[in-house]
Image: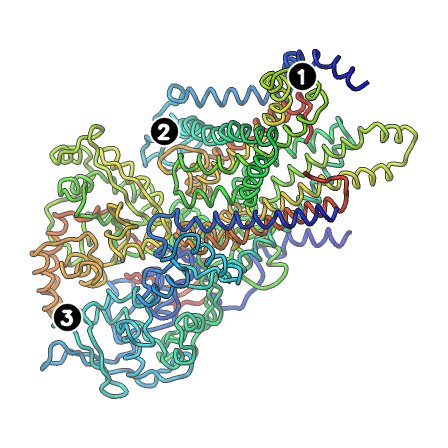
Amino acid sequence: MRRLVILLLALVFPLSPIGPAHAQGTLRIGMTASDIPYTGGQTDNGFEGFRFIGYQIYEPLIAWDLTRGDRLAQLVPGLAESWEVRKDAPTRWVFKLRKGVTFHDGSPFNADAVVFTFESIKKKDAPHFDPYGSGQVGFRLASLVGVSKVDDYTVEFETNKPTSFVPYQICYMLIVSPTQWQKVKDWRKFAEQPSGTGPFRVTKFVPRERLELDANKTYWDAKRRPKIDKLVLLPMPEPTTRLAALRSGQVDWIEVPPPDSIPQLKGSGFTITMNSYPHNWTHTLRLDKEPWSNKLVRKAANYAIDRVGICKNLLHDTCIPATGVVYKGHPWFGKPKETYDYNPAKAKELLRQAGFDGSKHPAKAVHLISTSGSGQMLPLAMNELIQKNLKDVGIDVDLQPVEWNTLLTRWRAGFKTPENESLNAWNISWNFLEPWSGFGRFFHSKAVVPVAVNTMPYINPEADKLIDEAERTFDVAKQDQILARLHEIVVDDAPWIFVVHDQNPRALSPKVKGFVQPQSWFVDLTAVSVR
Amino acid sequence: MAVSVALVEAPAVAAAPMSYWRTVAWRLSRDRATLVAGGVLVLIALSAVLAPWLAPYDPSAGSIRLRLAEVGAPGHVLGTDEQGRDMLSRLLWGGRMTLVAGLTPVLVALVLGAGLGVAAGYVGGITNTLIMRTMDIFYAFPAVLLAIAISGALGPGLANTLISLSIVFVPRVVRVAESATVQVKGLEYIAAARASGAGVRAIVRHHLLANVLGPILVFASTQVSLSIILAAGLSFLGLGVTPPAAEWGLMLNTLRQSIYVNAIVPALPGLAIFITSMAFNLLSDGLRDAMEIRG
Amino acid sequence: MWVYVGRRLLLAIPTLLGASIIVFAMVHLAPGDPISAVMPAESSQAEIEATKRAYGFDRPLPVQYLVWLGRVAQGDLGKSVATRRAVILDVRDALANSLVLALSSSLLAFVLGMAMGLLAAFRQGRALDKLASAVAVVGVSVPHYWAGIILIIVFSVQLNWLPAMGAANDPGVVEYLRHIVLPTVALALIPLGVITRVVRSAALDILNQEFVLALRAKGLGARRVFSHVVKNSAPQILTVLGLQFGFQLGGSVLVEAVFSWPGTGYLLNLAIFQRDIPVLQGVILVLATFFVLLNLAVDLLQTLIDPRIARH
């Protein structure tokens, strides 16, 4: 009896309130995803998948330099040492591959792996075609139509037309090990025992619960071998759960802490990192149906949103107001005519002009939102405020929340499926890392679903011309100017309700050292150490 | 011997319903806990009905700049929620939603369930088997699970919540009603009343209802607190009432994110659910004691 | 009595079948066509055709049901739309976690409930009875998800004694136990209340029986009375215990949501927001089956203990 009491007491008063000691150098991260992102190569769950799974286990031929926080992340050589477009054939790009790189399963990285990976995404009749992975990344590689092996360490990509966007697409193709796939011959099995070339390798996979990775001690870039021994990824879609886990020592790093808790966290010694990055949080509107088919209504919605209230009061300055696709100061911002400040009176006036009249003939819409997810920030609270802002000027929005990956899946199918037919918008956060992600995939008439993700659909010959011109231009400064002009047109057309640009807040335990938050969606975990 | 006792009983029993209910009322009036609970419920109901006049603010009005004000903040005696809306107003209006979501399914179940159960018990035979076995199928699902499953399939919204909760409670009431009816049906004085020539309507009115309605009412009253908790629970999961409606379960969900900033305001909706639920339980306890119902 | 047993066993079958019909119908309740409800969006045409054939979607509804039932009987609950894993695997893992939680909170509720109920009955009308009864009413009235949140605030955030979520990160029995304490307490509150009240009521019934009163007046030892009470109230208590265990297994959704405990409730909740119909069907069917078998077991156990209880 006494022993039982002692045992019970021992449960409630543990010796160490933080929890038992675990292997030194283990970094445990609480993600916003509801489940472990797909580990079979071309990952899902949006950019959080790339951030913690894709770019940690695998690598692309051209990678992002994530080691600095003082400027926008740039593209640098990854598994390819160099690349250039052939002067005699502008639709062909020659990539020279890095030598001496091995996959986690020991097999060598070479041109065969690149061809194999490309076919797994693009070649529908190949035995190694991955329908799921292809669905995730196919639209990002819209210009690439073929690849061929020149020799063991040289490949040549073919594009559908001359385009400067190729590096911006290659960076999303994660190279998988053909040898490993041949062993299991099934992508689901491959996902359970993944093999890439990245700085971390998977050791344990419990679906819906955790993913454990070990440092890849034979990673090819000796300067970037991980300082930690072990990485543990935990899905935690609820902000309060993430916060509780961080405070009680269950994890060392959480994405998106509840902004309300940031002052407290800072006071308790936790580190809050933030940085601006190419992110915008919008409602992407359906343009072929009322009410958003009317440009005046779209402008009205943009004048109805209290962005400062969201940023300052709801989110404690972890974001900045957005009145366009990119933020002011970005080379693509230009000089848009509409300022979209908070002006409910103007919004009501515009609505009246459009023929909608508050309570008598309100504008109605159904918007699909997510409950959590990468870049989605605090979707439920933010959307409730936006719903109120819009209601106050006479636009009734009904919100339908679904899980993040489900939202992405439905979005990629477009508005015209039976399931999505009743919707008028999706609330998805976007990136503008490069011209294709920022503009091409949305505003070009040739990017309409299912080719890419112009779901609205936005059809504007002016925009088409500018995007084509940008694609033909290899000079970055000239390209910036063209895109700035495009930006002015888009802001005026208001195909989206622009809301905020996130600052990507993260909370880290004081034990975590060496992390530099880049101006990017992604992170480099190799320099991080945990004491 | 039995017959004469029954005959003597019959007129007394025929007169019993009147003084029976009076006895119940008398018993209730002596039970302090039940009276207090009843009083609390009356207060809650009144505040819900009178919410439009009692609430100092519009429950959906608020300024984001005033969010999460403490209890006792100027102009907001119970503070404000995470969107800056007045808590007192939202609690008052939320009471309406919660009470509607809690009481309606039980009332529906009471009417439908009593009807089905008494019919099954009185008629017996195949009707009984059909009805009871169908109810058994729904009984195969634990209440919460059934509510979530149906709500999950139908989608969120108050109407769907009412439907799914009604489906949950009807089988339970049917079971109690059927069981009580069968028991009473077999009692001697019913046979005697039949023998003495009383019509079916008279039997039903005087004997069945008096002796069957009691247990059914008591049972139904015990389910109200569960219904309130389930309705609020569904909203808590995002399956019931949708934002920006004021409903205690939904408020608990949206305020949950704020427990680290301000621990008291987020606890208020939960406290409201708790007090209402407890009042209903005490009341049903008192009712059961007063009616001397077993089990 | 064995006739009764046989009859109950037979009755369970149509109940299970009826439950399965309801579960099967869910696919057709959800918006969109049934195929897209069970297939991932990126499925190839070949995969869609294969699934159509396997599920028999082009055949009449009753045939579809039988085909589906056949697969279920063989343990094939389909593939999750979200994770593309076999549903049976996900459900099995989740069920194990929920069972552990339900068992531990049932144990807590039973032990404490018995103790408090008996205490209240034996000290009827006195302070201890009032206290125990008050605790019971509180237990039955409290929204357990709210209680869970309060527990997290107090024990995890403020005092930092216990972890706030999930099953254990690090291996070890102590770690696992630390993670299970708060969810167990939250889930045990309502059953605790119910069990206390039932035990008290059942015990009082027996204690107030005339011959017991007489025996006590004659000086029958307290221990004999106690064991008599326990033995005779056992059937009722057993029923309640069984029902409450079912409630905890099926009703753990809300507590699992608050604590992110990876059980069937958590899975169900996620599947709803993922619109993952195969997982929804799988979880509900498995839980319903469990519940029916549990009720059956409780009924049979009751009859074994007290053959006088022949439920009609």
Name the residue carrying label 2: B59
Asked whether C300 or A128 is in front, the reply is C300
Position of residue C140 measured from the top left corner of the image (x, y, whole percent): 60, 35
Mark 3 lies on residue:
A164
Q: Chain of mark 3?
A: A
- Image vertical order of residue A374 relative to residue A315, above or below: below
Residue at the (37%, 34%) spot, across then down: B245
Residue A155 position in % (x across, y down):
23, 82
Q: Is mark 3 in CB contact (under 8 Å) with mark 2? A: no
Q: Nearer the viewer, residue A343 or A419?
A: A419
Question: Which quarter of the picture shows residue A432?
Answer: bottom left
Q: Amino acid at mark 2?
A: Pro
Q: Quadrant of residue B213?
A: top right
Which residue in the protein does label 1 denote?
A: B27
Mark 1, chain letter? B
Tell me where residue B38 appears, x and y as whole percent. Answer: 57, 21
